[in-house]
Image (cartoon, coloured by chain):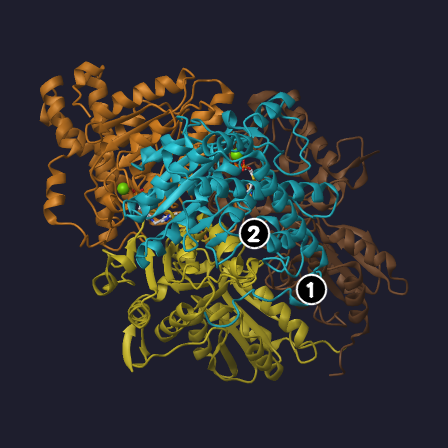
Chain colours: A brown, B yellow, C orange, D cyan
Amino acid sequence: MTTVKYWQAINRALHEEMARDDRVLVIGEDVADPGGPFGATKGLLEAFGPDRVRDTPISEAAIVGAALGAAMAGYRPVVEVMFLDFVTVAMDQVVNQAAKVSYMSAGNFAAPMVIRSICASGRRTGPQHSQNLEAWLAHVPGLKVVWGSTPADARGLLKAAIRDDGPVYVIESLVEWSTRGEVADEDEIVPIGVAAVRREGTDLTLVTWGGAAPRAARAVAQLEDVSVELIDLRTISPWDRETVLASVRRTGRLLVVHDAVVDFGVGAEIAATVATECFDELVAPVRRLGAPYAPAPFAPHLEAAYLPQPEDIVSAVLETIRTVRKAS
Amino acid sequence: MTTVKYWQAINRALHEEMARDDRVLVIGEDVADPGGPFGATKGLLEAFGPDRVRDTPISEAAIVGAALGAAMAGYRPVVEVMFLDFVTVAMDQVVNQAAKVSYMSAGNFAAPMVIRSICASGRRTGPQHSQNLEAWLAHVPGLKVVWGSTPADARGLLKAAIRDDGPVYVIESLVEWSTRGEVADEDEIVPIGVAAVRREGTDLTLVTWGGAAPRAARAVAQLEDVSVELIDLRTISPWDRETVLASVRRTGRLLVVHDAVVDFGVGAEIAATVATECFDELVAPVRRLGAPYAPAPFAPHLEAAYLPQPEDIVSAVLETIRTVRKAS
Amino acid sequence: MTAVRSQDVGVDRELAIDLYRTMRRIRQFETTAGELFAAGELPGFIHLSIGQEAVAAGVCAALDDADYITTTHRGHGHCIAKGGRLREMMAELYGREGGYALGRSGSMHIADNTVGILGANAIVGGGIPMAVGGGYAAQLAGRGQVSVAFFGDGAVAEGVLHECLNLAELWQLPVVFVCEHNGYAEMTPVSKHLANAEVTDLAAAYGMPAEKVDGNDVAAVLTAARAATARARSGAGPTLIEARTTRWRGHFEGDPQKYRAREEITAMTERDPLTHWRDVLHAAHGVPPAELDQVDADIADLVGAAVEAARAMPLSDPGGLSRHVYPEGAR
Amino acid sequence: MTAVRSQDVGVDRELAIDLYRTMRRIRQFETTAGELFAAGELPGFIHLSIGQEAVAAGVCAALDDADYITTTHRGHGHCIAKGGRLREMMAELYGREGGYALGRSGSMHIADNTVGILGANAIVGGGIPMAVGGGYAAQLAGRGQVSVAFFGDGAVAEGVLHECLNLAELWQLPVVFVCEHNGYAEMTPVSKHLANAEVTDLAAAYGMPAEKVDGNDVAAVLTAARAATARARSGAGPTLIEARTTRWRGHFEGDPQKYRAREEITAMTERDPLTHWRDVLHAAHGVPPAELDQVDADIADLVGAAVEAARAMPLSDPGGLSRHVYPEGAR
Ligand SMILES: Cc1ncc(C[n+]2csc(CCOP(=O)(O)OP(=O)(O)O)c2C)c(N)n1
Ligand SMILES: Cc1ncc(C[n+]2csc(CCOP(=O)(O)OP(=O)(O)O)c2C)c(N)n1
Ligand SMILES: [Mg+2]
Ligand SMILES: [Mg+2]
């Protein structure tokens, strides 16, 4: 075990995977010479050379598509689309092309590629740099979507993503960039599709991921009389239905917490699935907590009011616990 | 009342609105001289001239953005992004720009514009021309999303969209293009945010919209012993919660039917909301029916298997009716 | 655009006949597909490249199986010229289990990894970045492969092309950009969609060598393609070829073409790349018309057999609808 | 890029001082913002245009309130030059209720419909189409307005710019494209992101008049802007101006700039547009340095007052978080 910062864990995963498999490439804006806009690709150029590590122009559609072409031709590119918001200029390549290549060619081609983006929500970057867009990506068949909230998960998921034979969208939390955590010395993979039960509990299942996960953990830590099972989804698509459903079957209550706008967010899928599958076990209505229906605001106190804070989460837990099904 | 085809109803709305308000503009690929790739903009060039009706290059990002700029400068452009799938090359302009302009400028600017796209699902156009992407658009605060399934609604919603002071995404069903229906002779507006109760019922609430709505109607027509309340949402965002919730409070059962992939689709939002708000009234689990987790296939029989057909809808209704809450 | 004489550019008799054969395969495949569509046998939309065959044949004659191409909604010709199999293609148009993609993808999505067809594409401009990626892979692999992006004049207005021109030139990738300039984007003439219809000028602005050729003259296309691929294989970077050509049919089958006069179409057919090449074959290589008629007949049989085979195939299995959403098996 | 002499281009004493004043306002506003950021008073990211002030001042001096601009993440200068109010801007950077956008949007999203600022933008290239739309509106309105898109050399690699160049030229819109070529896209030098750093070549490929100017010489910029806006107002269509300039600071405040040598920055400061213009003011217009020192002092007071005002404002009200998601009230 070594203690590293979140970004260093990402950096380590990239170094390890590039050393392990020389088909792995890293391309993106500022990723080579500058070592990444925030350091995640430091040292890669020096270690693996300019063929495999390349700075690109600000041409997200072209670079995602170029990564796709290289993947179809046998390489395993990791392409950085700096902030998640910028995927909006590359959606065709992500959605119509990369995600569908295996299906459209009936397996004749695959797209073993990774797209990495920072989500800067919580870092006061304003409406065009703070969007939590995981729901869009999850709605696209063929695209896997992962988001580690700890250094170990950020590393392990990225490694798994690079080894996956299909396209994986890896989201990273800028707000956790300098958070430290332990990572294994050996080659630890966090399998895609497997949630982490951060804490076991019996009264309520709290499902969260990404930027909201650390805040949810803080909230749960404050709760004394309530036993919350805290699940960090880690993979948004395909999400770990079994773990979540089994948990709610035991606890009878679900709260989903995420930083995206509640409406039409990933929480809806989880809540709807649980409401259907655990219909007989639920003792309180499924509940979702997330951002209000508005773009992400810039000012620190506004952004704090916008994102679910530990105290909001505590209140939501307590209210859910208090709700009981009316006699029917 | 006149009976017109779906596309003619759209055409009529455009003629009427352009005649009513000379700030209304129509731009897009093939919309002027050719009268639209499928005829929806026929006669506009002749009636309103080349200033207000313009063919554009295949540059969706630029033309959506240009429409936005013109809207901010006081015009009311209607820009056509031919097939809904093509919004992927213009997502930045739709999501980061048009949808956020009012918010980001705190009302200093507004974007009174309409984006029209065909959804060709059901017309054997294959994986890149058949996507039902309304869930993405609905997840974007500031963007309204409407989708008429009848000639009258297609006309009335488009007229409402053109008169709205913010950006409205109008989806149109290619599969209904030649379906006939009655439209009022007068200036009929279908207000945004108001669902249509197509049929009243007491046993189950069926919520649908867009391409699935006609098939759902056919299914409901076949059901003899079950009383289904059929709601055509018409507006996806903001959706008519009141109508849906009031209905489920009476029927105790919800089935959402849409053509999009079920996972993370709009059905999730509706099902999750109903599961929460009607917790005590639901007598059966909320249920969703939609496309399986795969891109849209091309071959007619595959596409038929992919989209919810009347018989699938009938089965889902009957199964939901048979489910009862276990004694708890 | 200077006229090219076949003999001067190293096209021998055998190659000349091969080029004809390729064009004829395309013409026959598409003529048949058009008829089948009109007869209601083929579903969906199909876009034919009849009149443009020399571009596909000429460019692909400069390529090997290991080279890559990406193409467009109007991509049958490129796929055939690159070695795509008629039976699997036709079966795909029919939506049958034996189609290239089990009938799930249709006319606009032919792909074949055995001959480097990275894929046709239903998004205008969508395939260009993939070809650049193929070029990046080729550069890394160092085996002298080339990657070709086919696209139309309409795609020139899509920003992604420009991103790709810049990237390919910046990285000196072995990519050939082939613009099939047929003067239309759907129903809109080039005068209404490009401020400057000289696509070579755009490439030149990036410092990229660019050449305009008569796209209905297969020798001219081949000559340009040979120069471009040689440059690419030698590590000297990308080239753009603008091939001026003629789309005889509507944008899609069923398009009534109200936007252009019958004379325009008639004039086009007078520039038939196949007729022209038959003349060259006769005049320059002494190939008797009867020999070519036999080629035509053989190809008609081949295409006919592909149709019969497709018709005989089972419909693709709806049970397999969710297969390959994720890749199956390790690669 | 030929040197421009202020007298030769019709810049009189008053205008010359005005240009200085604008540049000084920008310099002072941003210097102060940089200090406040370093002191931890301003949250988020800020991107300063120090060293590039002549572009904003020169271009906007050719514009009226009725003209439109869109700008970028590095847009303080353009907003100030176009008439943006310092107090509302500073308050926005502080995230206060009195900010242009109630503190919700921050440094990268200044907009003001009273002076035609359609908006700064945090998406590279994102504002360019909006400026084209402003140009379309201007063309329709027929009142001789012009619409200007400011963007950097990095944005030249975004496809959307090319779509916009094509569209503006095709429609002959009254648009001026102003590329602030400072040689960097974040930490990446232009040699690594553009195959051809001569941005004027790209515009020329569309048939659009294009001119390269010394972006640190406000008279040169103004001269080019006057020609471009005159052309636009007369209905003769768009122009591109490539202004070569110098970004003194890091990409964002706090950027350690490991990717360039200290000497490079020092060399830049020797091309200070303000120092140069002070010299011109003195030599060509006889303005004594003391008069300019007074201008500087007045502006320092103004910016100081803006800071004080912003500090005194209440934080913006979280209760209003969902306001204006949809436009409020009829327009
Ligand atoms: C992004 C996108 N926009 C629009 C379309 C609709 N569309 C299909 S083909 C076409 C015209 C393409 O013209 P061109 O590139 O010249 O190719 P051609 O059809 O002439 O071969 C258009 C607009 C599309 N498929 N994708
Ligand atoms: C679509 C998009 N991609 C990437 C970024 C991140 N980014 C912000 S500024 C910038 C560099 C812009 O360079 P340039 O256009 O030259 O402007 P400058 O910063 O030099 O003024 C980048 C890559 C972004 N904001 N938007
Ligand atoms: Mg064309
Ligand atoms: Mg720059």
Residue D130 left/right relative to B26: right
Residue D123, percent from left and from top:
53, 46
Find residue B251 and report its image quarter.
Answer: bottom right
Q: Which residue is mark 2?
A: D109
- Label 2 is found on which chain of the structure? D
Q: Is residue B122 left or right of residue D30?
A: left
Q: Position of residue B195 (x, y in %)?
A: 49, 76
- Give the Cα separation between the discs numbered 1 and 2: 19 Å
Up-down: is C100 above or below B116? above
The residue identified by callout 1 is: D318
**Residue A326 in which image quadrant:** bottom right
Q: Residues within 10 Å of mark 2 (few under 14, many from 20)?
A: many
Side of C66 where A158 appears, left or right:
right
Q: As shown in the figure, which amino acid type bears the numbered disc 2?
A: His
Q: Nearer the viewer, residue C61 or A86?
A: A86
Q: Nearer the viewer, residue A54 or A108?
A: A54
Q: Residue at x 39, y 53 (%)?
A: D133
Q: Report the chain holding disc 1.
A: D
